[in-house]
Amino acid sequence: MLFRPRRLRSNANIRALVQENILTVNDFIYPLFIEEGTNICTEISSMPGIFRYSLDKISKELDEVVQLGIKAVLLFGIPKKKDDIGSETWNDEGIIQQAIRFIKKNYPQLYVITDVCFCEYTAHGHCGVLHHHDVDNDSTLTNTQKQVISHAKAGADMVAPSGMMDGVVGSIREALDNNGFDHVPVMGYSAKYASAFYGPFRDAADSTPEFGDRRTYQMDPANRREALKEVLLDVEEGVDIVMVKPALSYLDIISDIRQNTDLPVAAYNVSGEYSMIKAAAQKGWIDGEKVMYESLLSMKRAGADIIITYFAKEMAKLLK
């Protein structure tokens, strides 16, 4: 017998009926870069279409986000003041804390997630307190607790620790629970790789390390089994959502994690993945819209429930 799978591809109607995965606007979290100061609306040179905003200039962007039906934003702050420990991260009047209050007051329908890290706030650009030119894990955990409490007090709906410190989820969960914020969930950057795909983000967030790299705390791109270990440790510590970052070169990791946990799985479609598609499309080498769609669909197919992406607005327009 000749099997004929093409019968179920013969026209658009039957293809739609048997489509296994679908993208919707509800899948997306949109990252926002908020800079301390006024009158700032600066396009990031390596990320066409993505801007850094001061709070007095961000309303137009947020109006569009809401109009497009995007439900959640992930906030990154760029402060005026940096120091060796990133103390601005727990300043209750810091840029992220101000941004949370502004969004919750003016756009209460948006779900506000905060990136919890130090690299944008430290003079050296690393993700915590340095000791002998390396990040000291446990001192950084103490400061992370201060940061999440400040974010929660300002009204953050969810916190997302990105520094890859050992024990960070458990430390945050303890701090939140002991301070009356047991309702605030944690999205762990559970399998975050030391990736070259982050390059444009460092332009966006002024977070390039002053020396060295982040390989002592972020994961080796060669390692697959280790990702599952990291995820299961976060699960044990009480994480609510696990994440893989980057996404496109790590679809095997997303798939492994989907098969080994019932928790929601997020994929971070990072700056380099975004910028490569944008650059190739501007050259006319690819159909940018179709490649964008196919790339994001591949993350969903691999098992992601949530996709953090700079394409969120474009995809929302395409899906309307």
Image: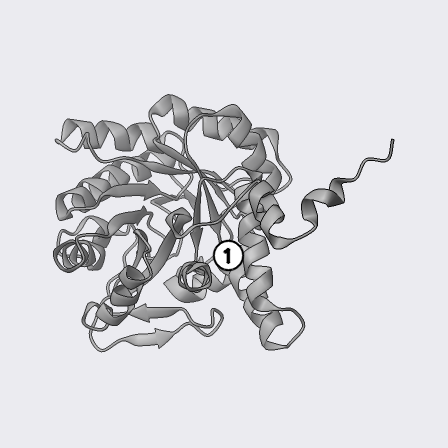
Identified at 51% across, 53% down, the residue is: 212
In the rendered image, is residue 206 in sight? no
Of all residues, the one furthest to the right in this rendering is 1
Identified at 26% across, 29% down, the residue is: 173
Viewer-nearest residue: 208 or 195: 195
The spot of residue 320 in percent (x, y) is 41, 60
In the figure, 3 relative to 205: above or below? above
* Position of residue 92 in the picture relative to residue 15 (left or right): left
Location of the N terminus (image quadrant): top right
In the rendered image, is residue 240 in sight? yes
Q: Secondary structure at mark 1?
A: helix
Based on the displayed image, in which of its 4 quarters is residue 51 positioned?
Answer: bottom left
Q: Which residue is mark 1?
A: 198
The spot of residue 318 in percent (x, y) is 46, 63
Viewer-nearest residue: 168 or 50: 50
In the figure, 279 relative to 82: above or below? below
Identified at 18% across, 58% down, the residue is: 107
